[in-house]
Image (cartoon, grey):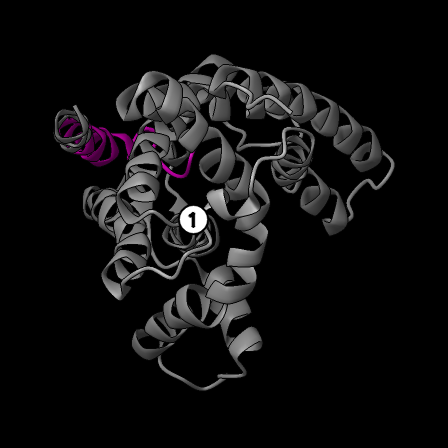
Amino acid sequence: MKQLSPQSRIAIYLIFLLLATIAANVIAARLTDSPVAGLILMTSPALAALLASLVTRHSLIDIGWRVTPIKWLGLGWILPILYAMPAYAVLWLTGLGGVPNPTFLERARFTLNMPDVPTHLLIPAAFFYITIINLLPSMLLSLGEEIGWRGFLVPELTKWLGVRNAAWLSGVIWAAWHFPGILSGEYGAQGTPLAYRLVCFTLMVFASGMVMAWLRMKSGSIIPVAIMHATHNGVIQTFLERITYNTGHTAYFTGEFGVALLPILLLMAWVVWKQMAKMESQVA
């Protein structure tokens, strides 16, 4: 069989992605309010990548299963904390968001079985549980997306267009993949105009996708990216959003659909853009 071009493999992947996503949405619609519905949707990029690899006789090793130095694993874990924690600290200090949310504390005491632990000890314990203890199961979920986005798509785009173009284009595709769920109201925060949520989310995914693409190509492995994706979900969705309570207009700033994460994330994207330029010049 003649070796297919990266363009052909990307086209085949996108076709499988479209079909897998449609099928996942149909199945999820029948599983209303079931956690399995979200799991099925999250695994559609991985399914598309595996099918595309099979059809094009593309080695699954190229997805990036190599063992990588611990510095890359650590970087995948720390990056979401670096762009999320300062953003929320500003919200809390300015009163744009309140902390701690009593509901979060109540649930944390129950989950961790720490009914009498002081708040100043409970919060670090909850953070440790979410970002360390729960990291492995969260990684298994994030791999459902990362096998597709950074495992298959980014390396193929890099072969075709170079790492910088692969980084921003994969971010655009990743964002667009979420649009149907956002537009239908099945995914995303409420309390702000839809157009505002779309803009904030798109910029957030675009910038974080740039960083993840750089991390994937620089480390040569999908594992640090899966850690970054899982840590992002844990730190932002499970910890910071839930520990913050609304003080009036908080929804405009918090989470993936607010503006607070964007300044540092866009700065990170600019930094890795410069790094990827050096990577390309070295290859040339």
Q: Judge whether residue 271 is colored magenta.
A: yes
Q: Judge whether residue 34 is colored magenta.
A: no
Quadrant where the N terminus is found in the figure:
top right
Residue toward you, 32 or 281:
281
Residue 166 lies in what quarter of the image? top left
User: What span is in magenta?
Assistant: 253-274
Quadrant where the C terminus is found in the figure:
top left
Residue toward you, 245 or 34:
34
Residue 199 at least partly seen: yes
Residue underneath mark 1:
222
Residue toward you, 6 or 224:
6
- The reply, left or right, for residue 135 in relation to residue 18 is left
Residue 83 vertical position relative to residue 100 in the rendered view, above or below:
above
Residue toward you, 38 or 95:
38
Question: In x, y percent, where is residue 27?
Answer: 83, 35
Query: Residue at the spot x=40%, y=29% of the render?
Result: 205
Residue 192 at least partly seen: no
Q: Which amino acid does label 1 sit on?
A: Ile
